[in-house]
Image (spheres, helix red, strand yellow):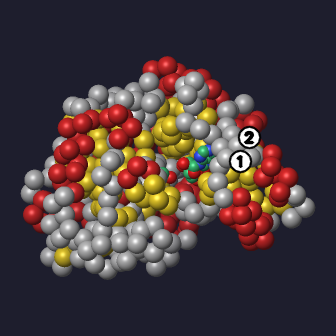
Amino acid sequence: MEEAVVVVVGSGGREHALCLALAQSPRVTSIHCVPGNAGTAQLATNHQLDDTSNSGLTEFCQSVDAHLVVVGPEAPLCAGLADACNEVGIPCFGPVAALAHLEGSKLHAKETMTAAGVPTADYQRLDSNSDIDAALDTFASDPWVVKRDVLAGGKGVIVTRNRQEAYEFIQKSIKTDGFVLLEAFLPGEEASMLVVMDGTGFCALPASQDHKRAYDGDEGPNTGGMGAYCPAPVIDGDVRERVMKRIVEPMHAYLSSQPIPYRGVLFVGLMIDEKKDPYVVEFNVRFGDPECQVTLPLVTSDLFSMLYAAATDGMSEHNATFSDQAAVTVVLASEGYPRSPRKGRTIGGLDEVGESTSYRKAWINFAGVSGSQSTGFIASGGRVLSCTAMGDNLADTQKEAYKLIQQLSLQGGHFRTDIAHRALRR
Ligand code: AMP
Ligand code: GLY
């Protein structure tokens, strides 16, 4: 197939990044985004479907003769969208529900890692019969890490030195969910590795680093991610080899031995300790957001071919290539994000910077943005957009991303001023 029609499911910065990268492919003739955002509207046709059930989505994909469905977020995967695509014979980038459970259930992820011998933090499962105080004593490695076993959009985890807070979160979670995980704290530096895989092979993309806390210096509440850069030097050649041997290879062996193999991207959230040993903090079954925005531009081979290969068990034949440049993205968030973002405000400066932006140099990834050039662009989400730059060295690239974001205005909007600080301090 030389003239591919692609459907991208989702509406965030990640999906705009996917559309931007797919639009570079000479093999892609049209992209449909469900529902998309103001950024994807510039590259794709956005569709607001009344019926977003699996059958509603697959019927839509059939109606546009889709050759490939790329699922951005985890929720439709956990709800079985890939299974539904398989049933109607449309290749889907994204795993079936049984495997998406790796993200949907932290307990399942822990059990899988134990079975596959993959290094991760020790944990205890606590329920209404457990002695919470005794468990808190066992894990008194300060701080305590408590994780709910539900898809909570980043709100299901607390890391705290406050025993009372840990106790209450455990108690509340047991009440609502039946059980909760208490986990040992892993010291070190975090990094994200995105591994595109199918039953026949895998390809690890250059590692990146997100900035999860809201404010400079990694202070403030956890967010979906306030900015990222790629590649992350914490994953040097030595560490990468350990990640491959101890984590990626055993996980791929496990995932490709399942009745339906994993077809999509496995997001490996890593903690690298001071001995350079990697541990898994979490698995996600999708591209990271905003990691996707800085990783995909560094893929110099055809992205459509890679995603299509993974959806059709062609990875063993696929050869991806990568740029040796660096990319940085800085997120502009609405006032009050992450606790209670103020939406509906006008974003200023987009028309003015529009002329000077260009993909793979300096450009904008739209996330929570609605409207259009003619009606004006409105902030419609917590994370509004991110300014991304790509260049030969990280320090100059960081400056370019900041040059872009400083030209925009959003009442009450905020962004971190230190994205990539760990790499630049080295
Ligand atoms: P998760 O949703 O599992 O990724 O957790 C959210 C964030 O909490 C991670 O990105 C880490 O910054 C932090 N975190 C989670 N688990 C641990 C752990 N065992 N040790 C240290 N930090 C953790
Ligand atoms: N940026 C982290 C995530 O997508 O989960």
Kindly identify the residue that appears in the image at 68 percent across and 32 percent down: 118
First reached walking from the N terminus: tag 2 or tag 1:
2
- What's the distance in space between the residues labelled 2 and 1, CA to CA? 6 Å
Q: Is residue 407 left or right of residue 71?
A: left
Residue 336 placement (x, y as % from top left): 40, 72
Q: Amino acid at mark 2?
A: Asp
240 or 262, which lies in front?
240
Kindly identify the residue that appears in the image at 71 percent across and 63 percent down: 164
Is the Cβ of the residue at disc 2 closer than 8 Å to that at disc 1?
yes
Assess mark 1: CB under 8 A from ligand 1?
Answer: yes
Would you say residue 113 is visible in this rendering? Answer: yes
Q: Which residue is mark 2?
A: 122
Q: Which residue is mark 1?
A: 183
Secondary structure under the numbered disc 2 in the rendered image:
loop
Secondary structure under the numbered disc 1 in the rendered image:
strand
Residue 243 placement (x, y as % from top left): 56, 28
Q: Quadrant of residue 383?
A: bottom left
